Amino acid sequence: MPAPAPSSAAPASTRSSVYADLGDCRVIGSQPDEAGYRESECAAPAGFALRHVEADGRGNLLVRKPGGEFVSLRLPEQRGGAFSQIAPRVEWRGSGDGDAFVSDVLVLRYLAWEDPADPKKQTAYLIPVALAGDRPCVAAFIAPGPGQSAEARRVADSAPGCLRR
C-alpha cells in the first residue's frame, strides 16, 4: 500500500523571538537600606533599552524606544500596589533575524502578591507590552491557567493596543 502523500505545510511564520535576561543588566543605582532600591539598565534588540526598577518590594519596568525617552509601564499601580517582581527572562517578539530583527512587542512574566489574606500566594501574569505606538504600554495582564502562554503569544502577535484602565 503506498504511503500517503505528505500534506502541504503551512507557510512559516514571519514572527520570531529574541530572549534577554534582566540579570545581565548593568546596575545604575542602588540603596539597600530598609526595603531597598535597585535600578538596572540594559540594551535590547533593535535599539530598545530597558530599566528594571526594584523598590519597596515592587518591580517595575521602563522601556525606551530607539531615539526616545524611558517610559514607565507603571506595573505596581496597575495591580493595586501589590508586592511584585519581574521574572528575569523577557521575550522580544517581532520580525526578522539577527541584525534585521525588529521588535514590536515585549512579553514579560510579572509575579504579584495581591491577596493580603494569603501573603505567600502569588499570581504569575504574562504581560504583552505594545511597542509599535507612540509610547510603550501594557496590552494585557494574562492570568495563569491552561493556555496562558498561547494566549500571551496570540495577543503579542495581534498588533495589540494599550490596555484601557
Image (cartoon, grey):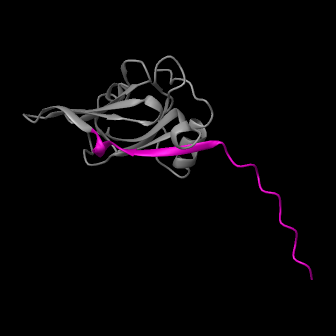
Q: How many marks?
A: 0
Quick one: quadrant of the N terminus? Answer: bottom right
Q: Residue 7, position in %: x, y?
A: 83, 62
Task: Name which quarter of the figure residue 86 lies in.
Answer: top left
State left or right for residue 42 relative to residue 17: left
Q: Magenta stretch mostly in which secondary structure?
A: loop
Name the residue rendered at 26%, 48% in the picture. Answer: 120
Q: In the figure, 81 relative to 7: above or below?
A: above
Q: Name the residue at the right extreme.
A: 1
Left or right: 160 in relation to 129? right
- Residue 128 is inside the magenta segment: no
Hey, which quadrant is residue 108 in on the image?
Answer: top left
Question: What residue is at 87 percent from the left and 76 percent from the top?
Answer: 3
Residue 101 showing in the rendered view: no
Q: Nearer the viewer, residue 60 or 122?
A: 60
Where in the figure is residue 66, as x and y percent of width and height? 44, 23
Say if residue 37 shows up in the picture. yes
- Which residues lie in the magenta part? 1-25
Question: x, y (%) of residue 6?
Answer: 83, 66
